[in-house]
């Protein structure tokens, strides 16, 4: 007879599969996200006092991934107001050890940088002000940090410019840092399915993180989409964007 925990896990797995196949539930989730977008819903949340600009569901998913993978280095492109790097640093603090977060942004505003540097989690954070795909300034610093810190488990989150060309370039550059059984998470792939566009933004349906993920996966068999995560969340800005490394190199 299965123990209580085994039975609970089995029930969760059954419910996740069932809800992911529920077209009505899927429709309600899509309607919610379309309505939420009008009000910049994701701007409403804080992590340890700093705006995180993420859906709570995706925050929880990243917590589960970090706890499972136990990375000693997390790389994020797109720092914005800094809540995500604080969140990642706090997870590494809970894990113990010497784990670090490297946050990369082309425009780290002074007040945001000061808020991060004055935070209790600052000891685990390194900020790089530069274009995420700049080989000379950014990529070489990353390679040096990974070497110096002897990082064995690396997790990457991409959340900067959301155009197809930019995200595809980031995927090609940053995927090489991701270690086996870890993830490169591409945020805002929902732009494609919700057809979110704006005259002030250089992305739209057909030109966004999801189209970049599709092209990346066509030419890279080392990663697969972890569909179980989005099936569990039902509300996520990263459908198809949780990419797990399943082998070291292309064979």
Image (cartoon, rainbow, N blue to C red):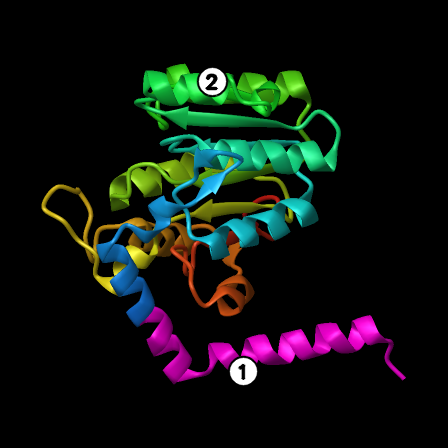
Q: Is residue 54 magenta?
A: no
- Count the marks: how many? 2
Q: Is residue 208 above or below residue 81?
A: below
Task: Work out which quarter of the rendered image holds the N terminus and state it.
Answer: bottom right
Q: Residue at x 46, y 40 (%)?
A: 46
Question: Which of the two discs, 2 and 1, labels the residue nearer the N terminus?
Answer: 1
- Tag 1: Cα neighbours inside 10 Å, few (<14), some, or many (≥20)? few
* Residue 106 position in % (x across, y down): 31, 23
Q: Which residue is mark 1?
A: 18
Q: Is residue 226 above or below residue 78?
A: below
Instruction: Answer yes or no: is residue 57 visible.
Output: yes
Find the residue positioned furthest to the right: 1
Q: Is residue 144 left or right of residue 199?
A: right
The front one of 245 and 109 is: 109
Q: Is residue 11 magenta?
A: yes
Which numbered disc covers residue 140?
2
The front one of 138 and 90 is: 90
Find the residue positioned furthest to the front: 49
Query: What is the quadrant of residue 196 in the picture?
Result: bottom left
Instruction: Answer yes or no: is residue 75 visible.
Output: no
Q: Is residue 22 left or right of residue 209?
A: right
Task: Tell me where the magenta segment starts and ends, as one range.
Answer: 1-30
Q: Is residue 96 above or below residue 55?
A: above
Q: Is residue 151 left or right of residue 203?
A: right
Which numbered disc covers residue 97?
none
* Residue 208 position in % (x across, y down): 26, 50
Q: Is residue 125 left or right of residue 51?
A: right
- Tag 2: Cα neighbours inside 10 Å, few (<14), some, or many (≥20)? few
Find the residue positioned furthest to the left: 199
Q: Residue at x 63, y 44 (%)?
A: 66
Instruction: For mark 2, give the secondary structure.
Output: helix
Examine the residues drawn in magenta and state their main secondary structure: helix
């Amino acid at each position: 007879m299965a123990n209580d925990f085994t039975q609970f896990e089995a029930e969760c797995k059954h419910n996740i599969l069932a809800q992911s196949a529920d077209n009505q539930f899927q429709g309600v989730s899509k309607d919610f996200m379309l309505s939420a977008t009008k009000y910049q819903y994701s701007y409403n949340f804080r992590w340890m006092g700093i705006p995180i600009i993420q859906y709570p569901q995706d925050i929880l998913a990243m917590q589960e991934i970090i706890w499972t993978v136990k990375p000693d280095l997390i790389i994020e492109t797109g720092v914005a107001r800094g809540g995500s790097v604080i969140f990642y640093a706090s997870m590494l603090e809970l894990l113990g050890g010497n784990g670090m977060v490297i946050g990369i942004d082309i425009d780290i505003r002074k007040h945001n940088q000061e808020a991060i540097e004055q935070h209790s989690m600052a000891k685990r954070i390194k900020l790089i002000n530069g274009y995420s795909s700049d080989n000379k300034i950014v990529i070489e610093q990353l390679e040096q940090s990974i070497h110096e810190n002897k990082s064995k488990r690396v997790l990457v989150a991409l959340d900067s410019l959301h155009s197809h060309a930019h995200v595809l370039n980031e995927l090609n550059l940053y995927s090489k840092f991701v270690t086996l059984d870890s993830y490169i998470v591409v945020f805002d792939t929902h732009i494609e399915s919700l057809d979110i566009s704006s005259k002030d933004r250089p992305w739209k349906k057909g030109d966004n993180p999801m189209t970049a993920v599709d092209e990346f996966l066509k030419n890279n068999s080392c990663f697969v989409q972890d569909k179980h995560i989005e099936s569990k969340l039902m509300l996520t800005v990263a459908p198809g964007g949780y990419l797990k490394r399943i082998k070291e190199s292309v064979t």
